[in-house]
Amino acid sequence: MLRQMEGSQAVAETVALCRPEVICAYPISPQTHIVEALSRITRAGRLGSCEYVNVESEFAALSACIGASAAGARTYTATASQGLLYMAEALYNASGLGLPIVMTVANRAIGAPINIWNDHSDSMSQRDSGWIQLYAETNQEAVDLHVQAYALAEELSLPVMVCMDGFVLTHAFERVDLPSQEQVDAFLPAYEPRQLLDPDDPVSIGAMVGPEAFTEVRYLAHARHLAALERIPAIAAGFESAFGRRSGGLVRGYRTEDADTVVLALGSVLGTVKDVIDELRGAGAAVGAATLTTFRPFPFDALRALLGGKRHVVVVERAFSTGVGGIVSADVRTALPDAELRTVVAGLGGRPVTKAALHALLTTDEPEPLSFLDLDRELVARELARSRERRRSGPSAENMLRDLAGGA
């Protein structure tokens, strides 16, 4: 059914179609509209006996999901930013226990200083927590990925994050083809847990494991992620057959066949990148674009198949590793060791990634291996000088805000 609706509402409606049995929620911007909508859906009786659990924190939300999932319930939660960091211990517990929880991450910057706008710092910080990470380019893809996420999580008994850009997608109104209950039921079978806490057959989970088996436990988690690299394309193909549209998968290319330079990005910024590619193509430049829908596990072979042999790859990062540089770039460099790789950190804290800035980036004569798009170097230089001149120079963020406002 085609509807014009907010991204958060579309995700909530889709999660409801997946028939969750326990939803645990603690609100944090820009995730709040998702769990608010699900609370209304649950209260209206549309989810039958589904239990909606209001908790006191994000840590409690995921902890309750862990208990519910271990008891055999299809579970869901959502979070963002500091909320995801507050869940960190429980994130590792959920993946270590092999529990198929699905969670929406409404991507948002991490403080301090506090910032409620979009970048990928939150989910990227948890890239090694053992969760599968899928990134949506559009609200339509966010809808589709949630259906696929449940199929994937429950087939492999692994938790899955569906990452969608905060505000840019969560609060944007777009046309969305919302699936019917019959379509989702036909695609997503009733939940049959691979492991289940049962009073009639008591077992312990998460018990102490010493050096004699801990490496093997971690290796099995790695093996399940490698299995996901095979199942994700298969589930995406099944989704396309059932719903009539292509969505999900591992990697996607845009005008890459004859491109010498390819811009790789995750999430909603790819729409702007595609517009710039089209304009540069019109001017005769051999450029293309690519995206990773699946970031964890990292699709090394699929990326090589798509971009192997390309001379230049520009990775647009919405987060970065302080003192090191690109996060996605590190994996891309492993996949494509022969390509000339450039890392461009862009859009931190919700700063717009404009077509003009991308044009300038892709047409510069002397590209830097690591650059920060639209960085105000004069503003940074003033703060660096201030900190050299005064030992007690004050908080940098507030100083620079005063500089921007023309203060002393």
Image (cartoon, grey):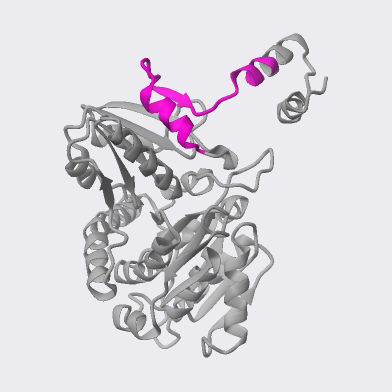
Q: Quadrant of the C terminus?
A: top right
The picture places residue 37, in percent across and down from the top left corner, at: 59, 74
Classify 182 as above or below 213.
below
Foreground: 357 or 185? 357
- Residue in the image at 44% along x and 51% along y: 129
Q: In this image, 45 relative to 141: left or right?
A: right
Asked whether the viewer can see residue 66, the reply is no
Q: Which residues are magenta?
A: 353-382
Classify 118 as above or below 202.
above
The number of numbered badges drawn on the structure is: 0
Asked whether the viewer can see residue 271, the reply is yes
Q: Magenta segment: does it hold 360?
A: yes
Q: In this image, 217 relative to 394: left or right?
A: left
The picture places residue 136, in percent across and down from the top left corner, at: 41, 56
- Residue in the image at 54% along x and 27% along y: 374
The picture places residue 107, in percent across and down from the top left corner, at: 53, 51
Q: In this image, 25 relative to 101: left or right?
A: right
- Residue in the image at 56% along x and 47% along y: 118
Q: Magenta segment: does it hold 95?
A: no
Foreground: 339 or 85? 339
